[in-house]
Image (cartoon, helix red, strand yellow):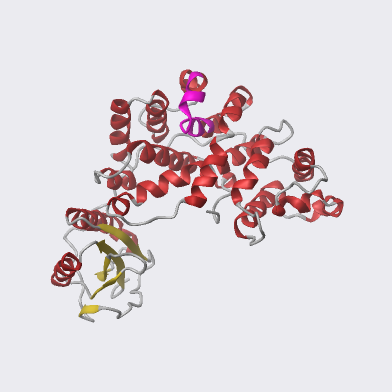
Amino acid sequence: MQGMDMGVQRVLVFPQEAVAREVARKLADAGCRFVAVHTNKGERLWNVASIAVYPVPEDGPEQLAPLLQHEKRRLAALARSRGGALLTYFYNAAGGVPVFSHNGLVHEDATARSVLPGPVPSLRSLLPRAPQWEGLDFGVPRTEIREAIAVAKRMYGTHGTAPHFLEFLMDEAFLEEIEEIDGGLRELLADLLDMAHHMPAQGADAALITPYLAELARSHTLSPGARTSLLHVLLGFASQVDAASTRFADWNAMGGRVDLRHFTRLRDSAVAQIPSLVPLWDRESDAARFVLVSLATFCPAQTASLVRTRLADIPALQGTDRADALALAAALLDEDPGALDMALRQMATWNDALAEQLESPHTPYPQAARAALAACVERDLSDAMQLLQHFG
């Protein structure tokens, strides 16, 4: 690793040119290799783009992670203190210096490197992980795919009312080909999500697939693993608006525009299904219940009476990440601002992303909490339950 560099791209955005150029000078004086100032396309704002280069320690690039996290938070605070926002902070964990556009270049030092502190900060240890869930295998592929087809036919029949990307499920020829599908239902669902998101056909809005996914999640024929994965997809739909609103809180506060219409349609379509999904609690596995808890927090008025008293059904030893997640869920279901603040602060002691978000006075706490809870649920589920890896 000796001699390797890691370049970090950063973009800070400000509403005034004078402020942007002042910050650019600070970054140049701090040893950045490149600094540029230019207008933000489509906005009356000014970008300060820079690359800071760090020598990679002998033990590897991953040793820089705590330092880079600290630097990211420091830059976000710098931008915020001057009415701006940190919009981009990106680096390749494998090392290397990215190509830098010379548009608006105000500083260049091709050999500049930031000096590492001695010693480099160590990685912060996470809370102990709760035990992995059990009993989440998918069922017999042929049986589960037949059920997926049967549900589609029950919902849409042969009247041409199915969303465009579900129409092939009505084709009898497809039923004859199901033996050839690799990966069974999991592969089929992942393909459906990709088609819902990417097909340019009229009406191919991904929100249109939500009622179908929810109906599949209610199926008694599907395996616990399949049902849990479907609930997790719906949680992904519900939580993306909150995640984006939290991530861009400083940007929104300074008047930046973020188009959340697509995510809002996904959220609304998912939330509409939650009150009829939560009553599935008694038949579901502990893992599925954990997903249902997170879903329930999006409409506590309809769900808290059933879910709040049953949080103890989910195994979670005190001092684990799952216990903190359930405490956060309880605060959201109770709609208790004091308890929510306490639960967020506790989770932030080991969740760096959340800790960074809470440093901004613009962060909306309920949205940050729901997004953090959904992220904890995703982290707690096995890879086999993840159908949204390339979706969104």
Residue drawn at x 81%, y 42% is: 157
Does residue 56 sit above or below 263 in this rendering?
below
Q: Position of residue 371 (x, y in %)?
A: 42, 41
Residue drawn at x 44%, y 34% is: 130
Does residue 152 sit above or below 110 in this rendering?
above
Residue drawn at x 54%, y 53% is: 389
The rendered magenta stretch, by its main secondary structure, is classed as: helix
Does residue 11 sit above or below 261 in this rendering?
below
Q: Position of residue 257 (x, y in %)?
A: 37, 56
Position of the N terminus, as image quadrant, is: bottom left
Q: Nearer the viewer, residue 256 or 278?
A: 256
Q: Position of residue 232 (x, y in %)?
A: 56, 41
Q: Is residue 237 left or right of residue 250?
A: right
Q: What residue span does the magenta drawing correspond to?
A: 292-305
Residue 195 location, quadrant: bottom right
Q: Is residue 94 left or right of residue 195?
A: left
Numbered-mark total = 0
